[in-house]
Image: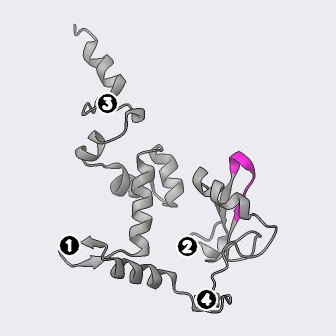
Amino acid sequence: MALRWDHRPGGVSVELNGKQSVLVFDAESQKSGRSEAVPLAPEAVELLTPMQRGAGWVFEPMAMRGGVPLARHALKIGKIISDIGKKAGVVTDAGSGRTATAHDLRRANGARWSKRVMPAVLKQLMRHAEIGTTMTYYVQQDARITASLPAESGNTRGNTLGDAGRRMQKTPRN
């Protein structure tokens, strides 16, 4: 909800400029104390481009009744997402009965992108300080996940080897 079109200290802003569109995290908004630009997914660019303005907030949440803007400091997005997860019955841990949270959305986003980009790119998208975090939580995939990847990833109908693996199998051994 703190996403802006213009740069402000301590904030996050959007830069839409064609092929190099990014989110810019100001140094004051980062644990590291450094400004950081993170690439935007093409789907996000497509969503945001028609809304683009020169300044101000990207999203203006409105009250359900009366259509008046809500006070940003009063919005607790994590709580709202948790409440939605609870009401929808989206259980993320059957043992404890825990329901979906904002962090679950982050993890789902990381898992989705782990199948589409190289680990170094995923590290940047997830804003991890160390590649080891990315490798531990998103790149070490279960064999069933790898087996279910679409054909464009090199996988074909249950064959997890892909083209490179098939070429290796056909290479005569000395």
The residue labelled by disc 4 is: 63
Tell me which label, 1 or 4, sits earlier in the chain: 4
As helix, strand or loop, the secondary structure at mark 2 comes to loop
- Marks 2 and 1, Cα distance to the nearest angstrom? 32 Å
The residue labelled by disc 2 is: 31
- Marks 1 and 4, Cα distance to the nearest angstrom? 34 Å
Residue 113, position as x, y percentages in the image: 45, 51
Q: Residue at x 71, y 58 (%)?
A: 49
Tell me which label, 2 or 1, sits earlier in the chain: 2
The residue labelled by disc 3 is: 156
The answer to whether any part of residue 41 appears in the image is: no
Residue 144, position as x, y percentages in the image: 23, 45
The residue labelled by disc 1 is: 94
Q: Quadrant of the C terminus?
A: top left
Tell me which label, 3 or 4, sits earlier in the chain: 4
- Marks 3 and 4, Cα distance to the nearest angstrom? 49 Å
- Marks 2 and 4, Cα distance to the nearest angstrom? 32 Å
* Residue 110 lies in quadrant: bottom left
Q: Which residues are magenta?
A: 14-20
Q: Residue at x 68, y 87 (%)?
A: 69
